[in-house]
Amino acid sequence: MNFRKIALKLRVQKAGFSAPRRLREPEEGVAEFRQNLNEQRTSRVNARFDAEYASRLSFVIKRWLFEQPLKAGALLLAAILVLAGCEAIGGLDINKALSDTFVPKAMEGKVSLAFDLVVDEKSADPNELAMLKLLQSMKLNLDALKVENAERMSAAGTLAVAGRNIPFRFYVDGPRLTFQVEGAKKPIVIDTAAVTGEGGAAASADGGVIAELQKKLSDPELSRSIMSYLIKQLPNPAKIGVSNVDATVHGESLNLFKLSGEVNGTELLPLVKRLLLNMMKDDQALKELIGQVYDALQPIVAKELDKMAAGEATGLTGDALGAAPASVMPLLNGIRDIWNDRETAIEVIHTEVKQVLTIATVGLAGIGEDGEQALKQVFNDTTYVKSELYFDHDLKLRKADTALMIAPRMANMGGVSAVHLTVASEFWNVNGAVKADPIDVSGGSLAVTKETNPSDLLLNLDRNSNVFKLLKDDLHVLRKQFYLPMGDGAYSAELGLPFIADDVTMVPTRYISDQLGVKVEWNDKTKTIVVTDPFAGTTIVIPTSGGAIAQVNGVDTDMGHEVIVRDDTSYVPLRFIVKALGGTIEWNDEYRMIQVTKE
């Protein structure tokens, strides 16, 4: 779905833009649009590879496939686990079995995930239909999953998508994810701190207090207590049962407990309501859990509160607060006194949690018939999650099969009538001696940072590889398309928008370079602007004085107008720079602006 185009359309429809002078006369609404465009431009969403997404990918792999490795069967396996109920059934202590499942442990395994879209061609946007068909069937296989401990894991597998089969390996070591895909010249390394900018001076000074808090919350015993509490409060769904079966795991025949459960969309709201009521009623269990969390976090938070009172750098705020004003000190001291008194702190936290539970309960009870009907459009009897979990007699999860179907009954589904996800997984050598397989980076690697863009990734790939063809030819990750409103064509120092000079459209050099995904540098020695597209192998040298002749890959080229510098911003001819970088421009009469496209 082209969200940029949709967002732009919502902003500009009937806004009253005008074309360049040689296209049409000025109209009203230009100032309003310029303000909207200025807000849009600050996000720079068109130009840069979303390195933050890569960081989130690293986090997901670490948290869901690593810190809690038995969820490796599926991201949604957790849903059926926590909805499986708390009562013992068929001789299986469900609470203990599921609580232990959420505790990180060493293990080996394999996972197969299949994702399918049911495409409705009649309701699909013609511009999006090709992409929907491309992604309507995907399969991910992890054939060699190895979890060494709560900080280290590895896996090898394949991704099948768009008719292409892509083998890969990854290795996680703390916040660092190393990824090797068939066709890559060098491994790709994603370091969460480098990508997100975390771990700065404050974090270093405090030893990473947020990481320390997360580590405490991930403690096996605390994780077990949290999950045990939640599972204890959950009611059993209508369809749940336990049987004793013989099954094969990693070639070994085992006698296992089989826990089968199913929840459809119509059951979800009643189950959530019952859960909230159970949590409100069981005060003692809630206070005990709060006490365990408090005991784990108390020393760390107490230390940070002392630093805040002293105006020192703290990992909770990321910088020094300075000396607290006299009006704030009583409040800060009161918070410290409460936190340092275990009984009082637990009572205060318990009161706050109960208030949240009460608000949620009242909110769900008061959604009314219209609200329930709206929920039923998505959570109906054709939406369901089914799971079969196999435990050995030591209550270790050894096998899991899960199926999720989301089939909303809505008028406009954007060409997708249903989503189907199936996951099959097996686990062995649980709590055994497991060593993750590192990926060798001694020959170099591609480090992903905030500045990494798609062309950097593609340059690291063999152009004949499946992953290169998927990214460039199928997913068009290099494709850029954006719009430039011209207003009345006059120069605006405040907004720095394109303007018209001698019937030539001039555009800010850095802005157009960022939008087209290329790099721009200033050569102080030659007083020239150098624009490079490493992927296409294009280098443009633009003079800032002495005429309108630039060099494109060493060939003199007439730009149509010399560079204009105003208010410390350089402007280059739009048509020249776009054409030199392999793009096209055209007047879009629907939106009354210039459309720029680069494949």
Image: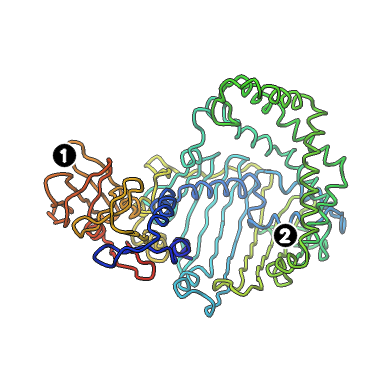
**Residue 559, position as x, y percentages in the image:** 17, 56
- In the rendered image, the vertical position of residue 392 relative to residue 286, given as above or below: below
Q: CA distance from mark 2 to mark 1?
A: 75 Å
Of labels 2 and 1, earlier in sequence is 2
Left or right of 219, for residue 416: left
* Towards the viewer: 147 or 506: 506
Q: Are marks 2 and 1 in contact (CB under 8 Å)?
A: no
* Towards the viewer: 445 or 377: 377
Q: Quadrant of residue 205?
A: top right
Left or right of 576, for residue 269: right
Residue that label 1 marks: 526
Q: Residue at x 67, y 51 (%)?
A: 70
Q: Nearer the viewer, mark 2 or mark 1?
A: 1
**Residue 42, position as x, y percentages in the image:** 42, 48
**Residue 87, position as x, y percentages in the image:** 86, 54
Say what amino acid the circle numbered 2 marks: Ser
**Residue 193, position as x, y percentages in the image:** 50, 38
Residue that label 2 marks: 253
How does the figure colour the protein chain or chains? Answer: rainbow
